[in-house]
Amino acid sequence: MTNKQRSYTSLDDTLEKMVRLLKSHRSEYISGEELGRSLGLSRAAVWKNVKKLQSLGYKINSKQKSGYRLTAKTSMMLPWEISDGLQTETIGRKIYYFDAIDSTQIFALKLAARPYENGSIVIAKRQTRGKGRQDRKWASPSGGIWLSILLKPNFQVSQVSLFPMLTSLALAISIEKTLKLRPKLKWPNDVTLNNKKVAGILVDASVESNQIDYLIIGIGINFRVKPGAINKIAKTSKNFYGAATLVGKKSDDDPIAFLQAFLFELEQLYNKVIANNLRGIKNDWEKRSSTIGKNVIVSSTSGKIKGRAVGIDDDGALLVSSKGKVQRLLVGDISQI
């Protein structure tokens, strides 16, 4: 398996246990013999796994007659690093990581057939066929956070339209709390900084008898990317208005801590939907919106509507006042006049 094809899941127990042991002995060396005894490995297997962890970005010092000591953890978004300290119950039960994949959304769709995959996350360092809304291409270079979340909620199909709103709101809250930035939300599913896109959301759902069988939330976050590279790729895409990055190349902000904060905020909102407690969600979204109160043109499959965006309803639909009437729109591309 080449480096670009490398993948790990939250079931890679040996590597995860070794990392936890090394982390618990950060101030001292732990012998290869003790590692082997704790993990049920030979000394040779211990050495092999240490080398594997080093190839994953962990800095591990080795000292003859003393053993091994972890001096720095990896910045790679490996399953056991994400789960270490993750404060969720459902989201992140199982995590799949890929150095490269065609699309996390495609892989998550394959997982959906398995009955016990509720809350599973698929995350990649980069995607070769990243998907946006309406089958548009999504540029997914290294430095971003590209993931899909598989959920199997027990509520009606009408509530699917809530998820772009919930997810973008969770992203905005986590950006505010962890990075101290003030993003804006552009209906229906974009998160922006300085009027440039830093994150987008795609929702795929399967419905049976008016009930949701599963839904998959695809999320692309420009965490630490080169906006110019994305702009070059995406500039020909319909309604593209420019990309931005959340943090700069020299920033020491931790993408794992940011992702953990986002997953926590998303689960809090998800639990509110399950409990049918939507109080405050709409207002929290609207006060961060760059759309509400503006004169807009909304393009959809049924044509173009020109009017004033006056709010969203409890299902996340945009309310546009046009020609004396308020129209309710669930999908569409929006531009300001």
Image: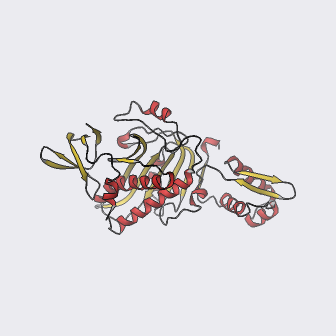
- The residue positioned 28% from the left and 47% from the top of the image is 331
- Quarter of the figure with the N terminus: top right
Asked if residue 207 can be seen in this view, the reply is no
- The residue positioned 26% from the left and 43% from the top of the image is 294
Nearer to us in this view, 40 or 191: 191
The mark tally for this picture is: 0
Asked if residue 47 can be seen in this view, the reply is yes
State the image coordinates of residue 11 (x, y, percent, origin top left). 60, 60
In this picture, residue 120 sits left or right of residue 302:
right
Rendered position, 211 above or below 58: below
State the image coordinates of residue 225 (x, y, percent, origin top left). 52, 39
Residue 63 in which image quadrant: bottom right
Rendered position, 290 above or below 177: above
- The residue positioned 71% from the left and 49% from the top of the image is 54
Residue furthest to the bottom:
275
State the image coordinates of residue 9 (x, y, percent, origin top left). 58, 56
In this picture, residue 296 sits left or right of residue 101:
left
Residue furthest to the right:
65
State the image coordinates of residue 52 (x, y, percent, origin top left). 71, 50
- Quarter of the figure with the C terminus: top left
Report the coloring of the rendering: secondary structure
